[in-house]
Amino acid sequence: MSAPSSRSPRRTASRGVLIPRSFVALFLLVFLTFAAALAWIIWGPGGSGLAFVTGDPTSAAPTPAPTSSPTEESPELLAFPTLEPTPTEDVTQPTPQPPAFSATYSGLMVMAQSDASYTHLFAYHPETRPLTRLTTGEWDDAFPSLDPAGSRVAFASDRDGDWEIYILDLLTGQTSQVTNDTTFQSAPTWSPDGLWLAYEQYVDSNIEIFVQPLDGSFDPLRLTFNQTSDQSPAWHPDGDRIAFVSTASGQANIWLANLSHLGQPDFTANLTNDPQHAQTSPAWSPDGSRLAWVSDFEGSDSIFVSSLETPTLQPIYIGPGSRAVWDPSGRFLLVDQRSPDQHFIAAYDVDSRRYIFPPTAVFGRLTGITWGPDLLQVPLPPDLQAAASAQVSAPWLTDLQPGAGVPARQLIIDLPDIVAPYPGLNQLATQPFNAFRARLRSEAGWDVLGDLENAYVPLTQPLPPYRDNDWLLTGRAIALHSVLIDLDWMTVVREDFGAQTYWRIFVRAANQDGSQGQPLTALPWDLRARFSGNTTDYEGGGALYPEIPSGYWVDVTALAREYGFDRLPSLSNWRTYFSGIRFNILAVTAGLDWETAMLQIYPPEIFLEP
Protein backbone atom coordinates (compact mmCIF):
# COMPACT_ATOMS: atom_id res chain seq x y z
CA MET A 1 0.00 0.00 0.00
CA SER A 2 1.37 3.38 -0.94
CA ALA A 3 1.91 5.87 1.84
CA PRO A 4 -0.95 8.34 2.29
CA SER A 5 -0.41 11.85 1.07
CA SER A 6 0.36 14.48 3.67
CA ARG A 7 -2.48 16.60 2.32
CA SER A 8 -5.79 16.48 4.14
CA PRO A 9 -9.18 17.60 2.80
CA ARG A 10 -10.26 21.07 3.65
CA ARG A 11 -12.52 19.94 6.48
CA THR A 12 -9.42 19.94 8.73
CA ALA A 13 -8.64 23.29 10.28
CA SER A 14 -4.97 22.83 11.09
CA ARG A 15 -2.16 23.51 8.62
CA GLY A 16 0.91 21.35 8.10
CA VAL A 17 4.50 22.42 8.62
CA LEU A 18 6.75 22.41 5.56
CA ILE A 19 10.03 20.64 6.37
CA PRO A 20 12.96 21.08 3.94
CA ARG A 21 14.00 17.91 2.16
CA SER A 22 17.64 18.49 3.11
CA PHE A 23 16.64 18.43 6.76
CA VAL A 24 14.74 15.15 6.26
CA ALA A 25 17.72 13.57 4.52
CA LEU A 26 20.07 14.67 7.31
CA PHE A 27 17.65 13.32 9.92
CA LEU A 28 17.41 9.94 8.15
CA LEU A 29 21.21 9.69 7.91
CA VAL A 30 21.63 10.34 11.63
CA PHE A 31 18.78 7.95 12.47
CA LEU A 32 20.21 5.10 10.37
CA THR A 33 23.66 5.59 11.90
CA PHE A 34 22.15 5.41 15.36
CA ALA A 35 20.10 2.32 14.40
CA ALA A 36 23.22 0.55 13.12
CA ALA A 37 25.04 1.25 16.36
CA LEU A 38 22.08 0.04 18.37
CA ALA A 39 21.91 -3.17 16.30
CA TRP A 40 25.60 -3.85 17.04
CA ILE A 41 24.93 -3.40 20.72
CA ILE A 42 21.93 -5.74 20.63
CA TRP A 43 23.51 -8.49 18.54
CA GLY A 44 27.13 -8.07 19.60
CA PRO A 45 28.87 -9.35 22.75
CA GLY A 46 26.64 -9.10 25.77
CA GLY A 47 23.39 -9.27 23.78
CA SER A 48 20.68 -11.80 24.59
CA GLY A 49 19.29 -14.44 22.30
CA LEU A 50 18.03 -18.03 22.24
CA ALA A 51 19.27 -21.05 24.16
CA PHE A 52 19.08 -24.69 23.03
CA VAL A 53 18.78 -27.04 26.01
CA THR A 54 17.81 -30.68 26.49
CA GLY A 55 17.63 -30.93 30.27
CA ASP A 56 14.78 -30.56 32.75
CA PRO A 57 11.93 -28.77 30.96
CA THR A 58 11.21 -26.74 34.09
CA SER A 59 14.76 -25.48 34.54
CA ALA A 60 15.72 -22.01 33.38
CA ALA A 61 18.73 -21.47 31.17
CA PRO A 62 20.63 -18.39 30.04
CA THR A 63 19.83 -17.18 26.56
CA PRO A 64 23.10 -16.41 24.75
CA ALA A 65 23.10 -14.42 21.54
CA PRO A 66 23.04 -16.08 18.12
CA THR A 67 26.49 -16.86 16.75
CA SER A 68 26.23 -14.35 13.96
CA SER A 69 24.41 -11.16 13.22
CA PRO A 70 23.03 -9.73 10.00
CA THR A 71 25.71 -8.10 7.86
CA GLU A 72 25.80 -6.47 4.49
CA GLU A 73 25.81 -10.00 3.04
CA SER A 74 22.72 -11.07 4.98
CA PRO A 75 19.59 -11.67 2.89
CA GLU A 76 17.31 -8.75 2.16
CA LEU A 77 13.67 -8.96 1.11
CA LEU A 78 13.41 -8.24 -2.59
CA ALA A 79 10.41 -7.84 -4.86
CA PHE A 80 10.17 -10.28 -7.76
CA PRO A 81 7.35 -11.15 -10.17
CA THR A 82 4.36 -12.87 -8.60
CA LEU A 83 4.20 -16.63 -9.10
CA GLU A 84 1.19 -17.52 -11.21
CA PRO A 85 0.03 -21.01 -12.23
CA THR A 86 1.19 -22.34 -15.59
CA PRO A 87 -1.30 -25.05 -16.66
CA THR A 88 0.94 -26.93 -19.03
CA GLU A 89 2.67 -30.26 -19.42
CA ASP A 90 5.85 -28.57 -20.65
CA VAL A 91 8.00 -28.24 -17.54
CA THR A 92 11.39 -27.95 -19.27
CA GLN A 93 11.53 -24.16 -19.57
CA PRO A 94 13.08 -22.53 -16.48
CA THR A 95 11.44 -19.57 -14.80
CA PRO A 96 13.63 -16.45 -15.46
CA GLN A 97 14.75 -15.92 -11.84
CA PRO A 98 18.56 -16.15 -11.56
CA PRO A 99 19.91 -17.44 -8.24
CA ALA A 100 21.82 -15.07 -5.97
CA PHE A 101 24.95 -17.19 -6.47
CA SER A 102 25.88 -20.44 -8.15
CA ALA A 103 24.36 -23.42 -6.35
CA THR A 104 22.98 -26.81 -7.31
CA TYR A 105 19.64 -27.65 -5.80
CA SER A 106 17.13 -30.20 -6.98
CA GLY A 107 13.90 -31.80 -5.89
CA LEU A 108 10.26 -30.73 -5.93
CA MET A 109 8.71 -27.89 -3.96
CA VAL A 110 5.02 -28.18 -3.13
CA MET A 111 3.18 -25.14 -1.79
CA ALA A 112 -0.34 -24.47 -0.56
CA GLN A 113 -1.14 -21.15 -2.24
CA SER A 114 -4.17 -18.93 -2.88
CA ASP A 115 -6.21 -19.88 -5.92
CA ALA A 116 -9.17 -17.57 -6.61
CA SER A 117 -10.12 -17.20 -2.92
CA TYR A 118 -9.43 -20.86 -2.06
CA THR A 119 -6.10 -22.53 -1.26
CA HIS A 120 -4.72 -25.40 -3.34
CA LEU A 121 -1.49 -27.35 -3.81
CA PHE A 122 1.05 -26.30 -6.44
CA ALA A 123 4.30 -27.93 -7.61
CA TYR A 124 7.25 -25.67 -8.33
CA HIS A 125 10.98 -25.41 -8.91
CA PRO A 126 12.62 -22.08 -9.81
CA GLU A 127 14.77 -23.60 -12.56
CA THR A 128 12.96 -26.66 -13.85
CA ARG A 129 9.23 -26.48 -13.16
CA PRO A 130 6.79 -23.57 -13.54
CA LEU A 131 4.10 -23.20 -10.91
CA THR A 132 1.73 -26.12 -11.61
CA ARG A 133 -1.60 -26.63 -9.90
CA LEU A 134 -2.05 -30.09 -8.33
CA THR A 135 -5.49 -29.74 -6.71
CA THR A 136 -8.56 -27.64 -7.43
CA GLY A 137 -12.12 -27.20 -6.18
CA GLU A 138 -14.22 -24.99 -3.92
CA TRP A 139 -12.40 -25.98 -0.76
CA ASP A 140 -9.02 -25.40 0.89
CA ASP A 141 -6.01 -27.74 0.70
CA ALA A 142 -3.21 -26.76 3.08
CA PHE A 143 -0.04 -27.82 4.95
CA PRO A 144 1.49 -30.23 2.39
CA SER A 145 4.18 -32.71 3.42
CA LEU A 146 6.12 -34.83 0.89
CA ASP A 147 6.92 -38.36 1.99
CA PRO A 148 10.62 -39.41 2.22
CA ALA A 149 10.47 -41.08 -1.21
CA GLY A 150 8.82 -38.07 -2.89
CA SER A 151 5.90 -40.00 -4.39
CA ARG A 152 3.09 -38.85 -2.05
CA VAL A 153 1.93 -35.59 -0.51
CA ALA A 154 0.03 -35.64 2.77
CA PHE A 155 -2.06 -32.52 3.37
CA ALA A 156 -5.05 -31.15 5.26
CA SER A 157 -8.30 -30.30 3.49
CA ASP A 158 -11.86 -29.29 4.31
CA ARG A 159 -13.21 -30.74 1.04
CA ASP A 160 -15.47 -33.11 2.96
CA GLY A 161 -17.01 -30.40 5.15
CA ASP A 162 -14.47 -30.57 7.98
CA TRP A 163 -10.67 -30.65 8.20
CA GLU A 164 -9.22 -34.12 7.55
CA ILE A 165 -5.85 -35.54 6.45
CA TYR A 166 -5.52 -36.73 2.83
CA ILE A 167 -2.75 -38.18 0.65
CA LEU A 168 -2.17 -37.26 -2.99
CA ASP A 169 -0.27 -39.89 -4.98
CA LEU A 170 1.92 -37.98 -7.43
CA LEU A 171 2.48 -41.07 -9.59
CA THR A 172 -1.21 -41.78 -10.20
CA GLY A 173 -2.90 -38.48 -9.33
CA GLN A 174 -5.27 -40.30 -6.96
CA THR A 175 -6.30 -38.80 -3.60
CA SER A 176 -7.15 -40.92 -0.56
CA GLN A 177 -8.53 -39.92 2.84
CA VAL A 178 -6.54 -40.88 5.95
CA THR A 179 -8.56 -39.56 8.91
CA ASN A 180 -12.30 -39.59 9.39
CA ASP A 181 -13.25 -37.48 12.38
CA THR A 182 -15.44 -34.40 12.60
CA THR A 183 -12.85 -32.57 14.70
CA PHE A 184 -10.04 -30.52 13.14
CA GLN A 185 -6.93 -32.38 11.89
CA SER A 186 -3.99 -30.72 10.13
CA ALA A 187 -0.19 -30.36 9.75
CA PRO A 188 0.72 -33.98 8.80
CA THR A 189 4.33 -35.22 8.97
CA TRP A 190 5.70 -38.55 7.72
CA SER A 191 7.55 -41.24 9.62
CA PRO A 192 10.93 -42.07 7.98
CA ASP A 193 9.62 -45.38 6.59
CA GLY A 194 6.53 -43.70 5.09
CA LEU A 195 4.16 -46.02 6.98
CA TRP A 196 2.85 -43.59 9.60
CA LEU A 197 1.64 -40.01 9.87
CA ALA A 198 1.77 -37.69 12.84
CA TYR A 199 -0.59 -34.73 12.84
CA GLU A 200 -2.35 -32.23 15.08
CA GLN A 201 -5.97 -32.68 16.15
CA TYR A 202 -8.38 -30.53 18.14
CA VAL A 203 -9.55 -32.44 21.20
CA ASP A 204 -10.46 -31.48 24.77
CA SER A 205 -10.68 -27.81 23.79
CA ASN A 206 -7.10 -27.56 22.47
CA ILE A 207 -4.77 -29.02 19.84
CA GLU A 208 -2.89 -32.25 20.58
CA ILE A 209 -0.49 -34.52 18.65
CA PHE A 210 -1.63 -37.90 17.26
CA VAL A 211 0.08 -40.64 15.22
CA GLN A 212 -1.66 -43.12 12.92
CA PRO A 213 -0.54 -46.07 10.76
CA LEU A 214 -1.58 -45.79 7.12
CA ASP A 215 -2.53 -49.45 6.88
CA GLY A 216 -5.34 -48.94 9.41
CA SER A 217 -3.98 -51.68 11.67
CA PHE A 218 -5.12 -49.75 14.73
CA ASP A 219 -6.75 -46.49 15.74
CA PRO A 220 -4.91 -43.15 15.98
CA LEU A 221 -2.68 -42.90 19.06
CA ARG A 222 -2.72 -39.69 21.10
CA LEU A 223 0.77 -38.57 22.17
CA THR A 224 0.15 -35.38 24.17
CA PHE A 225 -2.32 -34.66 26.96
CA ASN A 226 -1.56 -31.07 27.97
CA GLN A 227 -4.21 -28.52 28.82
CA THR A 228 -2.40 -26.18 26.44
CA SER A 229 -1.82 -26.28 22.70
CA ASP A 230 0.54 -28.91 21.21
CA GLN A 231 0.87 -28.53 17.43
CA SER A 232 3.05 -28.57 14.29
CA PRO A 233 4.70 -32.01 14.66
CA ALA A 234 7.94 -32.81 12.79
CA TRP A 235 9.07 -36.47 12.74
CA HIS A 236 12.81 -37.00 13.23
CA PRO A 237 14.54 -39.07 10.50
CA ASP A 238 15.56 -41.72 13.05
CA GLY A 239 11.87 -42.41 13.74
CA ASP A 240 12.17 -42.26 17.53
CA ARG A 241 11.46 -38.57 18.14
CA ILE A 242 8.92 -35.94 17.15
CA ALA A 243 9.52 -32.23 17.58
CA PHE A 244 6.46 -30.06 18.08
CA VAL A 245 5.31 -26.65 19.31
CA SER A 246 3.77 -26.38 22.76
CA THR A 247 2.57 -23.54 24.98
CA ALA A 248 2.88 -25.73 28.10
CA SER A 249 5.54 -23.40 29.52
CA GLY A 250 3.39 -20.30 28.93
CA GLN A 251 5.14 -19.34 25.69
CA ALA A 252 5.24 -21.21 22.38
CA ASN A 253 8.49 -23.22 22.45
CA ILE A 254 9.91 -26.20 20.54
CA TRP A 255 9.49 -29.44 22.48
CA LEU A 256 10.66 -32.99 21.79
CA ALA A 257 8.68 -36.20 22.31
CA ASN A 258 10.85 -39.30 22.73
CA LEU A 259 8.69 -42.13 21.39
CA SER A 260 10.81 -44.78 23.10
CA HIS A 261 9.87 -43.19 26.45
CA LEU A 262 6.13 -43.10 25.80
CA GLY A 263 4.23 -42.90 29.10
CA GLN A 264 7.33 -42.05 31.14
CA PRO A 265 7.97 -38.72 32.94
CA ASP A 266 10.74 -37.78 30.52
CA PHE A 267 8.60 -38.47 27.43
CA THR A 268 8.68 -34.75 26.47
CA ALA A 269 11.26 -32.00 27.04
CA ASN A 270 11.41 -28.32 26.15
CA LEU A 271 14.23 -27.82 23.66
CA THR A 272 14.29 -24.06 23.19
CA ASN A 273 13.05 -23.14 26.68
CA ASP A 274 12.75 -19.42 26.01
CA PRO A 275 10.08 -17.65 28.09
CA GLN A 276 10.54 -14.35 26.26
CA HIS A 277 10.10 -15.35 22.61
CA ALA A 278 7.77 -17.62 20.66
CA GLN A 279 9.32 -20.43 18.59
CA THR A 280 7.30 -22.25 15.95
CA SER A 281 7.53 -24.41 12.80
CA PRO A 282 10.21 -27.01 13.66
CA ALA A 283 11.87 -28.77 10.70
CA TRP A 284 14.54 -31.51 10.79
CA SER A 285 17.38 -31.73 8.32
CA PRO A 286 17.26 -34.98 6.28
CA ASP A 287 20.09 -36.54 8.33
CA GLY A 288 18.49 -35.45 11.60
CA SER A 289 21.57 -33.58 12.83
CA ARG A 290 20.05 -30.09 12.71
CA LEU A 291 16.74 -28.50 13.61
CA ALA A 292 15.38 -25.32 12.04
CA TRP A 293 12.66 -23.26 13.61
CA VAL A 294 11.12 -19.78 13.61
CA SER A 295 11.51 -17.26 16.43
CA ASP A 296 9.92 -13.85 16.91
CA PHE A 297 13.25 -12.60 18.28
CA GLU A 298 13.49 -8.80 18.18
CA GLY A 299 9.88 -8.52 17.06
CA SER A 300 10.15 -10.12 13.60
CA ASP A 301 10.01 -13.72 12.38
CA SER A 302 13.49 -15.16 11.86
CA ILE A 303 14.87 -18.59 10.98
CA PHE A 304 17.34 -20.23 13.39
CA VAL A 305 19.17 -23.57 13.13
CA SER A 306 20.60 -25.62 16.00
CA SER A 307 22.80 -28.70 16.00
CA LEU A 308 21.64 -31.78 17.92
CA GLU A 309 25.12 -33.26 17.74
CA THR A 310 26.50 -30.32 19.76
CA PRO A 311 23.46 -28.94 21.62
CA THR A 312 25.60 -26.57 23.71
CA LEU A 313 26.36 -24.50 20.60
CA GLN A 314 24.32 -21.35 20.19
CA PRO A 315 21.64 -21.42 17.47
CA ILE A 316 22.62 -19.82 14.18
CA TYR A 317 20.58 -17.01 12.70
CA ILE A 318 19.83 -17.77 9.04
CA GLY A 319 17.59 -14.90 7.93
CA PRO A 320 14.01 -13.62 7.91
CA GLY A 321 11.21 -16.14 7.48
CA SER A 322 7.99 -17.36 9.09
CA ARG A 323 8.33 -21.03 8.02
CA ALA A 324 11.21 -23.17 6.70
CA VAL A 325 11.70 -26.66 5.21
CA TRP A 326 14.89 -28.48 4.15
CA ASP A 327 15.80 -29.64 0.67
CA PRO A 328 16.62 -33.35 0.07
CA SER A 329 20.39 -32.72 0.38
CA GLY A 330 20.15 -30.93 3.73
CA ARG A 331 22.10 -27.93 2.44
CA PHE A 332 19.28 -25.50 1.75
CA LEU A 333 16.15 -24.12 3.40
CA LEU A 334 13.02 -23.07 1.54
CA VAL A 335 11.34 -20.30 3.54
CA ASP A 336 8.08 -18.38 3.63
CA GLN A 337 8.71 -14.67 4.15
CA ARG A 338 5.92 -12.22 4.89
CA SER A 339 5.16 -8.56 4.63
CA PRO A 340 1.90 -7.27 6.14
CA ASP A 341 -0.20 -8.30 3.11
CA GLN A 342 2.14 -10.38 0.94
CA HIS A 343 3.94 -13.73 1.06
CA PHE A 344 7.29 -14.47 -0.59
CA ILE A 345 9.23 -17.70 -1.03
CA ALA A 346 13.02 -17.82 -1.02
CA ALA A 347 15.77 -20.37 -0.34
CA TYR A 348 18.93 -20.05 1.74
CA ASP A 349 22.21 -21.88 1.68
CA VAL A 350 22.39 -22.77 5.39
CA ASP A 351 26.17 -22.65 5.75
CA SER A 352 26.70 -19.30 4.02
CA ARG A 353 23.28 -17.83 4.98
CA ARG A 354 22.94 -16.49 1.44
CA TYR A 355 20.09 -16.86 -1.02
CA ILE A 356 20.24 -19.56 -3.64
CA PHE A 357 17.18 -17.92 -5.13
CA PRO A 358 15.80 -14.58 -3.98
CA PRO A 359 12.37 -13.77 -2.52
CA THR A 360 9.60 -14.19 -5.07
CA ALA A 361 6.08 -12.89 -4.48
CA VAL A 362 3.29 -15.44 -4.09
CA PHE A 363 -0.26 -14.35 -4.81
CA GLY A 364 -2.34 -14.20 -1.62
CA ARG A 365 -1.75 -16.46 1.33
CA LEU A 366 0.75 -19.29 1.63
CA THR A 367 -0.36 -22.02 4.04
CA GLY A 368 2.39 -24.58 3.91
CA ILE A 369 5.53 -25.55 1.97
CA THR A 370 7.50 -28.77 1.56
CA TRP A 371 10.60 -29.82 -0.40
CA GLY A 372 11.51 -33.38 -1.34
CA PRO A 373 12.58 -35.67 -4.21
CA ASP A 374 10.96 -34.94 -7.57
CA LEU A 375 9.03 -37.94 -8.92
CA LEU A 376 6.38 -35.91 -10.71
CA GLN A 377 6.12 -37.33 -14.21
CA VAL A 378 5.81 -35.67 -17.63
CA PRO A 379 3.16 -35.80 -18.89
CA LEU A 380 1.21 -35.47 -15.68
CA PRO A 381 -1.26 -38.20 -14.68
CA PRO A 382 -4.78 -37.38 -15.97
CA ASP A 383 -6.16 -36.18 -12.62
CA LEU A 384 -3.22 -33.88 -12.06
CA GLN A 385 -3.34 -32.60 -15.63
CA ALA A 386 -7.03 -31.75 -15.15
CA ALA A 387 -6.16 -29.71 -12.05
CA ALA A 388 -3.23 -28.00 -13.79
CA SER A 389 -5.44 -27.01 -16.73
CA ALA A 390 -8.38 -25.76 -14.66
CA GLN A 391 -9.42 -22.20 -15.44
CA VAL A 392 -9.98 -20.20 -12.26
CA SER A 393 -10.51 -16.48 -11.85
CA ALA A 394 -11.30 -13.84 -9.26
CA PRO A 395 -13.77 -11.49 -10.96
CA TRP A 396 -14.10 -9.27 -7.89
CA LEU A 397 -10.48 -8.14 -8.33
CA THR A 398 -10.68 -7.11 -11.98
CA ASP A 399 -12.23 -3.64 -11.71
CA LEU A 400 -10.63 -2.05 -8.66
CA GLN A 401 -9.34 0.88 -10.72
CA PRO A 402 -11.16 2.78 -13.47
CA GLY A 403 -10.53 1.36 -16.92
CA ALA A 404 -10.60 2.97 -20.35
CA GLY A 405 -13.90 4.73 -20.99
CA VAL A 406 -14.88 4.67 -17.32
CA PRO A 407 -15.64 8.11 -15.83
CA ALA A 408 -12.84 9.30 -13.57
CA ARG A 409 -15.28 10.37 -10.84
CA GLN A 410 -16.77 7.36 -9.07
CA LEU A 411 -20.06 7.21 -7.20
CA ILE A 412 -20.78 6.15 -3.64
CA ILE A 413 -23.16 3.23 -3.98
CA ASP A 414 -25.73 2.58 -1.26
CA LEU A 415 -25.67 -0.83 0.37
CA PRO A 416 -29.34 -1.18 1.36
CA ASP A 417 -28.98 -4.37 3.41
CA ILE A 418 -25.99 -3.16 5.46
CA VAL A 419 -26.33 -1.56 8.89
CA ALA A 420 -23.82 1.28 9.27
CA PRO A 421 -23.96 5.05 9.95
CA TYR A 422 -23.52 5.59 6.19
CA PRO A 423 -23.98 2.24 4.43
CA GLY A 424 -22.20 2.92 1.18
CA LEU A 425 -18.95 2.26 -0.70
CA ASN A 426 -17.09 3.48 -3.73
CA GLN A 427 -18.64 1.68 -6.68
CA LEU A 428 -15.26 0.09 -7.47
CA ALA A 429 -15.23 -1.54 -4.01
CA THR A 430 -18.79 -2.85 -3.96
CA GLN A 431 -18.15 -6.06 -5.92
CA PRO A 432 -15.17 -7.13 -3.76
CA PHE A 433 -17.18 -6.28 -0.64
CA ASN A 434 -20.23 -8.27 -1.71
CA ALA A 435 -18.10 -11.29 -2.62
CA PHE A 436 -16.12 -11.03 0.63
CA ARG A 437 -19.31 -10.71 2.68
CA ALA A 438 -20.91 -13.79 1.11
CA ARG A 439 -17.77 -15.92 1.56
CA LEU A 440 -17.24 -14.84 5.17
CA ARG A 441 -20.89 -15.54 5.97
CA SER A 442 -20.45 -19.05 4.56
CA GLU A 443 -17.19 -19.67 6.44
CA ALA A 444 -18.31 -18.24 9.80
CA GLY A 445 -21.98 -19.20 9.71
CA TRP A 446 -23.20 -15.66 10.48
CA ASP A 447 -23.28 -12.34 8.65
CA VAL A 448 -20.15 -10.71 10.08
CA LEU A 449 -20.23 -7.81 7.58
CA GLY A 450 -23.97 -7.19 7.70
CA ASP A 451 -23.61 -4.78 10.64
CA LEU A 452 -20.57 -2.49 10.49
CA GLU A 453 -19.12 0.10 12.81
CA ASN A 454 -18.39 2.21 9.72
CA ALA A 455 -18.29 2.06 5.95
CA TYR A 456 -18.06 5.25 3.88
CA VAL A 457 -17.60 8.32 6.09
CA PRO A 458 -18.55 11.68 4.46
CA LEU A 459 -16.25 14.68 4.83
CA THR A 460 -18.92 16.37 6.91
CA GLN A 461 -18.64 13.77 9.66
CA PRO A 462 -15.92 13.88 12.33
CA LEU A 463 -13.38 11.14 12.81
CA PRO A 464 -11.20 10.58 15.90
CA PRO A 465 -8.09 12.79 16.26
CA TYR A 466 -5.00 11.91 14.20
CA ARG A 467 -7.17 10.12 11.62
CA ASP A 468 -7.78 12.91 9.10
CA ASN A 469 -6.35 10.93 6.17
CA ASP A 470 -8.51 7.91 6.93
CA TRP A 471 -9.38 5.31 4.29
CA LEU A 472 -12.99 5.31 5.50
CA LEU A 473 -13.28 8.72 3.78
CA THR A 474 -12.48 7.16 0.40
CA GLY A 475 -15.43 4.77 0.36
CA ARG A 476 -12.95 1.91 -0.03
CA ALA A 477 -12.82 0.76 3.60
CA ILE A 478 -14.97 -0.88 6.23
CA ALA A 479 -14.67 -1.03 10.02
CA LEU A 480 -15.88 -4.15 11.80
CA HIS A 481 -17.70 -3.63 15.08
CA SER A 482 -15.08 -3.44 17.84
CA VAL A 483 -17.79 -4.40 20.37
CA LEU A 484 -17.47 -7.96 19.04
CA ILE A 485 -14.27 -8.25 21.11
CA ASP A 486 -16.19 -7.44 24.29
CA LEU A 487 -18.74 -10.10 23.35
CA ASP A 488 -15.96 -12.69 22.74
CA TRP A 489 -17.06 -13.10 19.12
CA MET A 490 -13.84 -11.52 17.85
CA THR A 491 -10.20 -11.70 18.88
CA VAL A 492 -6.99 -10.30 17.39
CA VAL A 493 -3.40 -11.51 17.11
CA ARG A 494 -0.68 -8.89 17.14
CA GLU A 495 1.85 -9.03 14.29
CA ASP A 496 4.82 -6.66 14.20
CA PHE A 497 6.70 -5.85 10.99
CA GLY A 498 9.66 -3.71 11.91
CA ALA A 499 8.39 -0.64 13.75
CA GLN A 500 4.80 -1.09 12.53
CA THR A 501 2.10 -3.06 14.32
CA TYR A 502 -0.65 -4.90 12.45
CA TRP A 503 -3.53 -7.07 13.65
CA ARG A 504 -4.95 -10.36 12.44
CA ILE A 505 -8.70 -10.52 13.02
CA PHE A 506 -10.49 -13.75 13.95
CA VAL A 507 -14.24 -14.19 14.47
CA ARG A 508 -15.83 -17.11 16.25
CA ALA A 509 -17.58 -19.66 14.01
CA ALA A 510 -21.29 -20.07 14.68
CA ASN A 511 -21.02 -23.87 14.47
CA GLN A 512 -18.43 -25.26 16.87
CA ASP A 513 -18.58 -28.83 15.54
CA GLY A 514 -15.55 -28.60 13.24
CA SER A 515 -17.52 -27.76 10.11
CA GLN A 516 -16.55 -24.08 10.21
CA GLY A 517 -13.29 -22.34 11.05
CA GLN A 518 -10.14 -23.70 12.66
CA PRO A 519 -8.66 -23.67 16.18
CA LEU A 520 -6.37 -20.77 17.01
CA THR A 521 -2.67 -21.58 17.06
CA ALA A 522 -1.26 -18.30 18.45
CA LEU A 523 -1.88 -16.34 21.63
CA PRO A 524 -4.22 -13.40 20.89
CA TRP A 525 -3.64 -9.89 22.20
CA ASP A 526 -5.93 -8.75 25.00
CA LEU A 527 -6.77 -5.13 24.18
CA ARG A 528 -8.96 -4.92 27.29
CA ALA A 529 -5.97 -5.59 29.56
CA ARG A 530 -5.00 -1.91 29.18
CA PHE A 531 -7.99 -1.08 31.39
CA SER A 532 -7.21 -3.66 34.10
CA GLY A 533 -5.33 -1.21 36.32
CA ASN A 534 -1.98 -2.87 35.61
CA THR A 535 0.51 -0.13 34.72
CA THR A 536 2.60 -2.39 32.48
CA ASP A 537 -0.43 -3.52 30.49
CA TYR A 538 -1.64 0.06 30.11
CA GLU A 539 1.70 1.33 28.83
CA GLY A 540 2.01 -1.68 26.54
CA GLY A 541 -1.42 -1.23 25.00
CA GLY A 542 -2.63 -4.54 26.41
CA ALA A 543 -1.08 -7.96 26.94
CA LEU A 544 -0.99 -11.47 25.53
CA TYR A 545 -3.76 -13.80 26.61
CA PRO A 546 -2.51 -16.27 29.23
CA GLU A 547 -3.67 -19.16 27.01
CA ILE A 548 -5.09 -19.75 23.56
CA PRO A 549 -8.92 -19.44 23.56
CA SER A 550 -10.77 -22.63 22.78
CA GLY A 551 -13.13 -23.19 19.89
CA TYR A 552 -13.15 -22.71 16.14
CA TRP A 553 -12.36 -19.34 14.58
CA VAL A 554 -12.28 -17.84 11.08
CA ASP A 555 -9.25 -15.80 9.95
CA VAL A 556 -10.98 -12.67 8.64
CA THR A 557 -7.73 -10.96 7.68
CA ALA A 558 -6.55 -13.83 5.45
CA LEU A 559 -9.95 -14.14 3.81
CA ALA A 560 -10.23 -10.36 3.31
CA ARG A 561 -6.92 -10.35 1.43
CA GLU A 562 -8.37 -12.82 -1.08
CA TYR A 563 -10.95 -10.18 -1.99
CA GLY A 564 -8.58 -7.23 -2.17
CA PHE A 565 -9.01 -5.88 1.38
CA ASP A 566 -5.75 -4.90 3.11
CA ARG A 567 -5.30 -4.27 6.80
CA LEU A 568 -3.82 -0.99 8.00
CA PRO A 569 -1.00 -0.44 10.50
CA SER A 570 -1.73 1.04 13.88
CA LEU A 571 -0.79 4.65 14.49
CA SER A 572 2.51 5.09 16.33
CA ASN A 573 0.67 6.11 19.52
CA TRP A 574 -1.67 3.10 19.60
CA ARG A 575 -0.48 1.87 23.00
CA THR A 576 -1.97 4.89 24.76
CA TYR A 577 -4.56 5.95 22.18
CA PHE A 578 -7.24 3.31 21.61
CA SER A 579 -8.61 4.80 18.37
CA GLY A 580 -5.09 4.64 16.94
CA ILE A 581 -5.06 0.82 17.03
CA ARG A 582 -7.18 0.57 13.85
CA PHE A 583 -7.32 -3.21 14.27
CA ASN A 584 -10.80 -3.46 12.77
CA ILE A 585 -10.32 -1.47 9.53
CA LEU A 586 -9.91 -3.19 6.14
CA ALA A 587 -9.41 -1.21 2.93
CA VAL A 588 -9.46 -1.98 -0.80
CA THR A 589 -6.37 0.11 -1.53
CA ALA A 590 -5.63 -1.52 -4.93
CA GLY A 591 -2.14 -0.02 -4.84
CA LEU A 592 -3.49 3.53 -4.67
CA ASP A 593 -2.32 6.18 -2.25
CA TRP A 594 -4.96 7.82 -0.08
CA GLU A 595 -5.07 11.09 -2.03
CA THR A 596 -5.61 9.34 -5.38
CA ALA A 597 -8.40 7.28 -3.83
CA MET A 598 -10.03 10.46 -2.52
CA LEU A 599 -9.89 12.06 -5.97
CA GLN A 600 -11.95 9.18 -7.35
CA ILE A 601 -14.99 10.50 -5.48
CA TYR A 602 -14.16 14.19 -4.80
CA PRO A 603 -12.88 17.11 -6.90
CA PRO A 604 -9.34 18.41 -6.32
CA GLU A 605 -10.73 21.49 -4.57
CA ILE A 606 -11.14 19.53 -1.32
CA PHE A 607 -7.39 19.81 -0.81
CA LEU A 608 -7.27 23.60 -1.18
CA GLU A 609 -6.31 25.39 2.01
CA PRO A 610 -9.18 27.46 3.45
Image (cartoon, grey):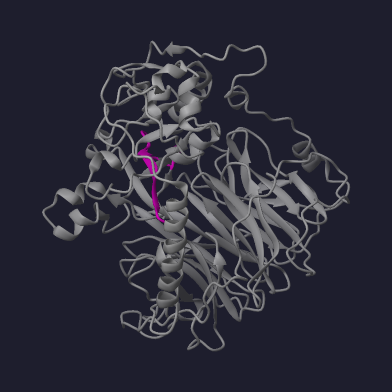
Position above or below: 521 against 608: below
Position above or below: 590 against 38: above
User: Residue 52: percent from the left, percent from the top?
Assistant: 45, 81
Number of numbered discs overlaid on the protein picture: 0
Report the residue that reaches farthest toward the left.
533
Q: Nearer the viewer, residue 567 or 276?
A: 567
526 with respect to 231 (left or right): left
373 with respect to 431 (left or right): right
Examine the image and state in which quarter residue 82 appears: top right
User: Residue 429: percent from the left, percent from the top?
Assistant: 50, 22
Q: What residue lies at 38% left-to-right and 84% top-to-bottom?
A: 46
Q: What residue lies at 63% left-to-right and 28% top-to-bottom?
A: 394
Q: Nearer the viewer, residue 506 or 144?
A: 506
Q: Is 207 covered by the magenta stretch?
A: no
Q: What residue lies at 49% left-to-right and 30% top-to-bottom?
A: 588
Viewer can see residue 146: no
Q: Give, as a single range, the part of the protein colored magenta.
A: 498-517
Q: Nearer the viewer, residue 433 or 183?
A: 433
